[in-house]
Image (cartoon, rainbow, N blue to C red):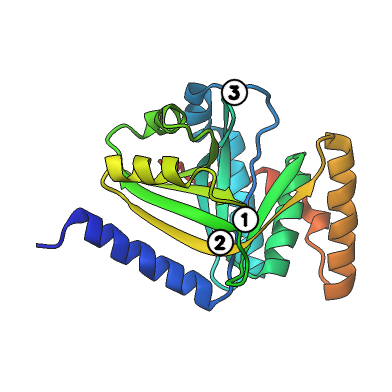
Amino acid sequence: MISLRSLLSAILWCFLLTGNSTAQSFLFVSPNTREHMTDEFAWASLDSFEQNNFLAVADYLTTRLCAKPRVQSAEGMDGSDTENSSLITGCSSTKARYVGELLGRYTHQKWILVFDPDASSKERLLIATFSSDHPADVAKELRQAGLNAGTIVFLEKTVRFYLWRKNASQDAEVRAYVESHHGVLEEIAGKGTFIGSDHRSQAQGIFDQRIRAYEQAHHQSFSRLLWTKQLHDLKRAATH
C-alpha cells in the first residue's frame, strides 16, 4: 500500500515538474488592507465578499493573460499578523508581474511578491505539504515552531506552506515541522522580488507606472476595468 507521505510527494513532484516546465512564476498578493489581524479573523476572512471578489477578479485576469493559471485562496503570515491572501501560478514572469500589479492596484496594496524559478540562484522557495485535521490552527502551530512568515494554502485536509528564503537560516525549523507532521518538503531555486512600497500611496504610484509601461509595450489594457462594475460585482464560491 502506498503511504500518504509517498502519495503527497508524488503529487507535489508532478506539480513542481509541470510548473517548472512552463517557467511559471509564483505570485503572492493579498486583498487585505487592515492592520494586525488575528489568526481567527484572517481565517474567517477567507469566506468574505472581499476575498471572493478578489479571487474572482484574479480568475478573470489570469484566464485572459496566462497559459495555465491557478488562483488559490490562502493565508499570509507576517510576524504576529495573519491576513487573507492568495497564491497565483501558471503565469510567465512578465505576466505574473502585470497581474500582481493590477491586483495590487485594485486592492490598494503596499507590496506584492513574485518568485521566479532559476536553477542558478541561491534563493529558494520551500514548499511543505502535510495533513491537518484543524487547518484553522495551522498559522498558530507554525509560529510555535518558530516560523512566523509565509503563505498557507488549504486543500481540504491537505495544507501547503510556502516560504521564500534567501538563506538557510530557517531550514532546521521547517524540516522539524514537516517531520513532526509526517509531511513532504520540496524546494525550488529561484529569485524573489517585492514590488511596491511601505507607503501605500507610493506603492499605488509604482503599480500605476509599471502597469502603464506593460500596457504600452504589449498593446493591451486591463487597467481600464479595475474600477468598473463588471469587476466589482464578480463573485467566486468559497474555497475552504
Above-or-below relation of 16 to 171: below
* Left or right, residue 134 beside residue 149: left
Q: Nearer the viewer, residue 162 or 218?
A: 162
- What residue sits right under mark 1 in the picture? 27
The label on residue 89 is 2
Within 10 angstroms of label 1, few (less than 14), some, or many (20 or more) residues?
Answer: many
* Left or right, residue 21 beside residue 129: right
Q: Are marks 3 and 1 in contact (CB under 8 Å)?
A: no
Q: Nearer the viewer, residue 106 or 93?
A: 93
User: Closer to the N terminus: mark 2 or mark 1?
Assistant: 1
Q: CA distance from mark 3 to mark 1?
A: 22 Å
Kind of residue indicated by mark 2: Thr
Quadrant showing the N terminus: bottom left
Task: Tell me which corner region of the image, top left, top right, bottom left or bottom right, holds residue 63.
Answer: bottom right
Kind of residue indicated by mark 3: Met
Q: CA distance from mark 2 to mark 1?
A: 6 Å
Picture coordinates of residue 206, whole percent (x, y)? 87, 49
Q: Residue furthest left?
A: 1
Picture coordinates of residue 7, whole percent (x, y)? 24, 61
The residue under the point 40% across, 33% down is: 138
- Secondary structure of the residue carrying tag 2 is strand
The residue under the point 37% across, 62% down is: 12
Q: Nearer the viewer, residue 195 or 154?
A: 195
- Secondary structure of the residue carrying tag 1 is strand
- What residue sits right under mark 3 in the picture? 37
